[in-house]
Amino acid sequence: MSPVVALVGAGPGDPELLTRRALDRLSKADLVLNDALVPEVLLELAPKARRFFVGKRAGRHSIEQATIHRIMIRAAKRGERVVRLKAGDPFVFGRGGEEALALLAAGLEFEVVPGVSSALAGPALAGIPVTHRGVASGFVVVSGHAPTAWKPVLSGLSAANVTIVVLMGIAARRDIAHFLIERGFSARTPAAIVCAASQPEATRWLGTLESLAQAELASHEGPGVLVIGEVVQLARTLLPSEPMAFALAALG
Ligand SMILES: C[S@@+](CC[C@H](N)C(=O)[O-])C[C@H]1O[C@@H](n2cnc3c(N)ncnc32)[C@H](O)[C@@H]1O
C-alpha cells in the first residue's frame, strides 16, 4: 500500500508524459491539490477526487504555503488519499521539499513521485539535446524569477561547453541575456524560448543571445523556458518542420 500523501510530478502537461505511478496515484486519490500549470486534462485522471486549486492566478492572492500544508495534513489525518499535483517534477522549483518536511513534521507518511521536469522536456521537445557530445558537457538549471536567484549561478559560468536552462525566466530574458554578454558570452550564442512544451499551444522561438535581449513578446503562450548555449543550434536540424508556431517576434 502506498503512503496516504503523494507529492506527484505532473510532467509538462501532456498526459502521455505522466509516469504510470502518477496515473495510479491520481486514479486512487480522494483529494487533489493542484497548481495553476497543471492542465484540466490531467485532473480528469482523478475521477473520484475532490479538487482544490492552490496555485497562483494573475491578479489574485495565492494561497499561503502554510495553508496548503494544513489542508494536506488535515485530509491525510482523516484517512483520505491525497495527491499534491505539481507541474514538472515536484522537487524542481516547486516547493515540494517544504511540503515533504511539513508532512514529516506532522508524522505522516508520504511519497514523492518524480515527474518529467520542463527543464528537460522543454529543450527536448524543441529539438535541443542539452548535453550533445562535443558541444556541451553539462547543463545548468536556474530560476529566473529574481536576480538574486540567477546572478550568483550564472556569474560563475563560462560560455564553453555549458547549456543554460532558465525556468520562470521569460520576463527576465533581456536582463539575463545582457548579463551573459557582459560576462563574455558571445552575442551570437544560440538561444531558444520554448513555451507550453508538450501542450497543444506549444511554441518555439530560436535566435541568439543578442536577439533574446531584444525579443518582443507577440503573445504570451503559457509558461516557458529559456535555453542558451551552442546546442540550441541543433534544434532546426533535429526538428526542422516547425511543429509549433513562433510566438515571439525577434527584432534585429
Ligand atoms: C514554479 S516553476 C515549476 C517547475 C516544475 N516543477 C518543473 O519541474 O517543470 C514554473 C516554471 O516551470 C516552467 N514550465 C512548467 N511547465 C512548462 C511547460 N509545459 N513548458 C515550458 N515551461 C514550463 C516555466 O518556466 C514556469 O515558469
Image (cartoon, rainbow, N blue to C red):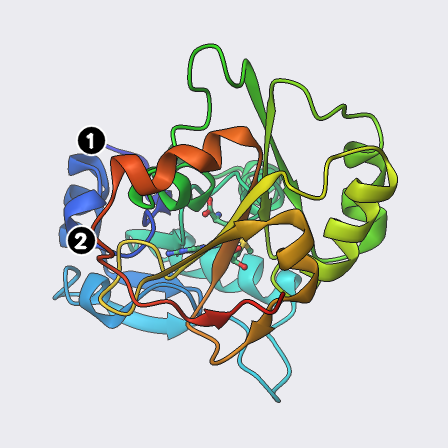
Farthest-out residue, front: 252
**Dot 2 surroundings within 10 Å: few (below 14), some, or many (20 or more)?**
some
Q: Amino acid at mark 1?
A: Met
Spot occupied by residue 124 in the image (x, y as percentages of width and height)? 34, 37
The alpha-carbon separation of the residues under discs 2 and 1 comes to 24 Å
**For marks 2 and 1 on the same chain, the one whose residue lies earlier in the sequence:** 1
Identify the image quadrant of the N terminus: top left
Q: Residue at x 38, y 33 (%)?
A: 234
Spot occupied by residue 19 in the image (x, y as percentages of width and height)? 21, 37
Is residue 130 placed above or below 249 in the rendered structure? above
Spot occupied by residue 240 in the image (x, y as percentages of width and height)? 24, 45
> Circle 1 is placed at which residue position?
1
Q: Residue at x 76, y 23 (%)?
A: 158
What secondary structure is marked by label 1?
loop
Q: Residue at x 47, y 40 (%)?
A: 119
Identify the image quadrant of the C terminus: bottom right
Q: Amino acid at mark 2?
A: Pro
Q: Nearer the viewer, residue 232 or 149?
A: 232
Spot occupied by residue 142 in the image (x, y as percentages of width and height)? 65, 40
